[in-house]
Each structure stands twice: as structure tokens, then as C-alpha cells.
Image (cartoon, grey):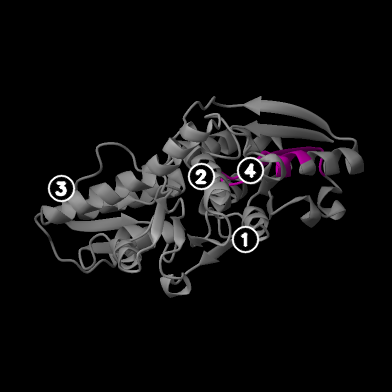
Amino acid sequence: MRILLVNPRGYCAGVEMAIKSLELALQRFGAPLYVYHQIVHNAYLVEHFSARGVVFIDDLQDVPVGATLMYSAHGVSPGIRQEAQARELNVIDTTCPLVTKVHGEAVRYARRGYTLVLVGHRGHDEVVGIMGEAPGAIHLVQSVEEVAALDIGRPERIAYLTQTTLSVADKQDIEAALLRRFPHIEQPRTDDICYATHNRQQAVRKLAAKAQLAIIIGSQNSSNSRRLADIAQSLGTPARMIDGPEELQQHWFTTVGTVLLTSGASVPESLVDETLDWLRQHFDASIEEQSAKQETQHFHMPPQLRRLRERIGIPSTVNVQDPEKATLP
């Protein structure tokens, strides 16, 4: 069997920053350490950190007054920030800077009296946070059909924003529908779609036709991982999403000669390595690295953790690709 191992894959800069920050916060503040929502959408990482005393919560009433609370990479609404302040929580904000950008756009447009359309997935943590920036002014759409059903009249000022982890193709279709219905609609100065989401999707789009099966490592609640599976399937290549190699089934590969293997932006490389080991063991698989684009982006830790890291001499680069080996010195 031939394995096409896609690059780029795995951690984006925002996830790496969030995981690195959680490691350092655990060292500094100890357990229990509270995180609002899952730090990233990956079941393996959530289980790993839960076992070390991290408590993932969806209601701030579950956090003791004065405790340490970390915001996940997906961001939070102003209401959550206000509630955390009222409860005197020690807040560490690991919102991805690319998500923060969209929050800022929502605030600026709302202050100027714009009606806003947000293209995103209903109920996703990122979308909930963004909509909280301008309640009543933001209308959520998930499809071209929902654009047609929008009931907002003909506003003089209207703009749209997008969730950072959307399918690029779906976003383009919805964008076109918005422009047809509202020819004067404004768009962000720069694309809201995350660079890592775009790069991983483009790599799958480029390579999927070369394989008879795509294996996407990523959790079901990971929007960017699901989009990778959707793209492969849209191009005629069956796709399976797995959290790890323990979910692989030998019968999936009965008539498969070439497998495309990649991982979502919140998946540690250790899971990719374990999946490759399983495929080698069961099918004597050969591995071919397929590089579509190099990524060099890095995001800084939150200021209070950055200062702490510098004070106690922790290096600026920490291996967080394998959580079992990621404990800081």
C-alpha cells in the first residue's frame, strides 16, 4: 500500500499557541485549571489534559470565584468576559489572533451602524463568540438557501464576515449569493478564512484524486477537519474521519492501493505517527510525503505567560506535537 502523507497538516499557529499556553499555565498555577469550552476541538487532547487536572466547562458558574480560567482558541463573547471579571477570575486569553480579527471587524462594523451577515456553522464556539459582539445586528447564514431566506430588507449599510474554519468553496458560493442579493455589501479587507484552513483544504483538493481512500485524523466537532473530509468526498474519494489509529478497520483497505493521510489543525503529530505505524504493521505501507505549501507562522503566548516564560527561562519553542512529551522544564 502507498500512503500519500499530506503537508501541511496538523497544528496551526493558533492551536500551537493555545496548547503551549495551557502547558505553561498548568506549571504555574497547578490543577485544577479551568478552560472555557474545549481548548481546541480534539478529543485526544481534551482527554490528555483532563487527566492532568484541567477542567473544561461551559458555564462560568462552575468556576470558583478567584480561580484561573483560560479562554479557548475559539474566543468568547463580551458577556463571558464581563461575567469572568465579576467573578474575579484570573483570565488567560488564548483566543487565536485570526479569530480576534473577526471579533474586531464585527465591533467596528456594528459601531458604524452596519447590518452584519456572518457566514458560519450554527452553534460552533467561534460563531457564538463573534455573534455576541453585536447581538441583534448579526444574521447567521450557513448556506446559499439561507442567504435567499434572509429577512433584513434592503439596509443601506451591510457587510459580511466569515468563520475562520469554513470550506473555501462553500464560502465562495455563499459570498456570491450575498453579492447577488446585496450588490453593495462590504467584505473584510483581508479574507477571514484562516491561512491553515485554506492550505490544508488546498492540499487535499490537489491530491485527493490520486488516492482511493482519504483518512482524516480529527474529531467530529472539529470544523476544519470535517471540511477536509467533505472536500475529498466531493472529489470522488471516500473519506474516513478518525480520532486515532484505534478506530481504523482493516476492511476499509481491502481494495485500496493508495491512501491519502492528513490531519486537522488541532491534531498532534503523534497521532499521525501512530496511524502510520498501524498502516505499516498491517499493510507494509510505503510513505510518500506530499508537500503543497510550507508554513512558518507563529503566534505569541498571552502576555502574562510570555513574561512568566522569560522569567523562569523556558525556551520560546516548546514541542507540543506530542502531548506525552510536552511537559515544560
Number of the front mark, 3 or 1: 1
Q: Which residue is mark 1?
A: 53
Q: Which residues are magenta?
A: 256-273
Q: Is residue 315 above or below residue 213?
A: above
Indicate which disc residue 21 carries.
2
* Cβ atoms under marks 4 and 1 closer than 8 Å: no
Q: Which residue is mark 4?
A: 263
At 83% across and 48% down in the image, what residue appears? 253
Dot 2 amino acid type: Ser
Q: Position of residue 289 (x, y in %)?
A: 70, 27
Between discs 2 and 4, the one toward the N terminus: 2
- Residue 116 falls within the magenta-colored stretch: no
Q: Earlier in the sequence, mark 2 or mark 3?
A: 2
* Left or right of 192 on screen, residue 212: right
Q: Quadrant of residue 85?
A: bottom left
Name which of mark 1 and mark 2 comes first in the sequence. 2
